[in-house]
Amino acid sequence: MLHNTNSLTTFLSKLSVLNYKYRLLENDKEQFNIFKVLHKETDEVRLHSRFISVLLSPESTHNKKETFLKLFLEQLSIENFDTTNVKVYPTESQKSEFKEIDILIINRVSKQAIIIENKIWAGDSNHYHRGQLEGYYDLIHLSENIPKENIYVLYLTLDGHYPTVESLGKFGSLDNMNGKTIDYEHEIQTWLTLCLQECISHPFLRESIIQYINLIKQMSNDFTNMEERLEIINLISSSSENMSSAKLLVENFKHVKWHTVWDFWYELSIELEKEGYIVNLKPSKEDVTCTTHFEVYKKSYEASNDYGLRLSLNGKIQLFIWNGTGDDWLYWGIYPQGLQLDKLLTIESLGCFNKNETEYWKYFDLCSQENIFFPDFSYKGTFNLIDRNYRKMMITEKIVHEINSYVGTILNE
């Protein structure tokens, strides 16, 4: 056992040196990115959907007419789509979505349409009477009089995950909506690379696409270049000890992740109790095993994969802290039924809460490098929680502090 520990320590030290070397080289590269300057990098509507739609539109000022659109259709194997008379929403001049659809490619002459639902972090916006994708599909079919067989649905995400059953509604699957999942790292990045080849003599357009590709690589955690990857492979394969150490890390990292997530929720509940909150359903460690995936925390309503904590304070405020297993990072909120009507106006006046029919909620005000997304430890904010000191800092100085600040504002109104 001691031999394994020493070998792993040596292997990690060598890997750390390699990482340090490439991070130094990375710091010498130009870091400026106009997209990150103008918008939050995860801004689905104002950044990603608008830029993609402008490239797709034959009417845009890039003057490439249907070229980019045709490359997009070829990349996604969508055949026999008439690219003449096509309208793409949002447009350069009208930046709003078409009836809340992130990107709509529509040919009202040939009666064809492509719906692109763009999900960077947000979950599906379902309603009690219909799912999000179900509603968009029916909307285009009925309001635009387009046959269902001529409507395609593309579900665009960072990791290619599937939409929720609720979003699909009565259709049950994307196949029944002529649909498929696509992601930024593969389909979108490949398409953009093809677009680059068409704008060699257009420097402004070319550099804009290059910067957008770089943004996608950062969002997809695709930082390593080929040389760095080859060095990592060579390091692992250079000795049997390194091979064993790498295998040990791979086999045990799932346990590291599980314990990190469990410790986070448990330590958070303890800190909240110190502040006077009553934490409902706080578990003992015996209640949770690796296979239950925090069942003790799960929401009570049907078909939910979300988990988190429910809180109350002085019998006046009902709160929750939640992390979905789909594509929502850590967020918190307040149940309206726990507040008087005048307090609801106070929440809205804070200018930071979103709302649906049953709750007010917001993501924690963490910087983009610190966002917590438990399903994926490749994100820095999640990975760093393995460090108990970092985890304590995030809980006490960020999360609990933010909740206390807003709750204090509400109670003092």
Image (cartoon, rainbow, N blue to C red):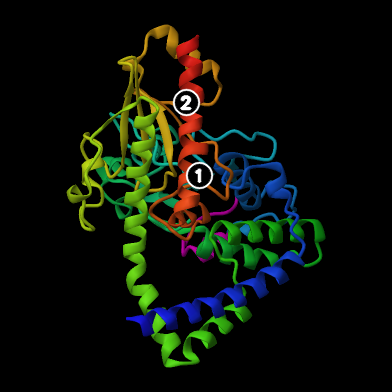
* Residue placed most toward the observer, 116 or 141: 116
Chief SS of the magenta region: loop
Write down the residue under mark 2: 404
Label 1 environment density (alpha carbons within 10 Å; few <14, some 14–19, many ≥20): few
- What's the residue type where badge 2 is placed? Asn
Q: Is residue 241 above or below residue 251?
A: below
* Residue placed most toward the observer, 47 or 75: 47
Point out residue 272 in the picture as x, y percentages from the top left corner: 38, 32
Q: Quadrant of the N terminus?
A: bottom left
Label 2 environment density (alpha carbons within 10 Å; few <14, some 14–19, many ≥20): few
Point out residue 355 in the picture as x, y percentages from the top left corner: 43, 25
Q: Indicate whether residue 79 is drawn in magenta.
A: yes
- What's the residue type where badge 1 is placed? Met
Point out residue 193 in the picture as x, y percentages from the top left corner: 63, 67
Point out residue 171 in the picture as x, y percentages from the top left corner: 27, 45
Say whether residue 55 is left or right of residue 1: right
Write down the residue under mark 1: 393
Query: What span is colored magenta in the figure?
Result: 70-84
Q: Indicate whether residue 162 is drawn in magenta.
A: no
Task: Please report the residue visible at 28 percent of the width from the left and 29 percent of the height from the top.
Answer: 129
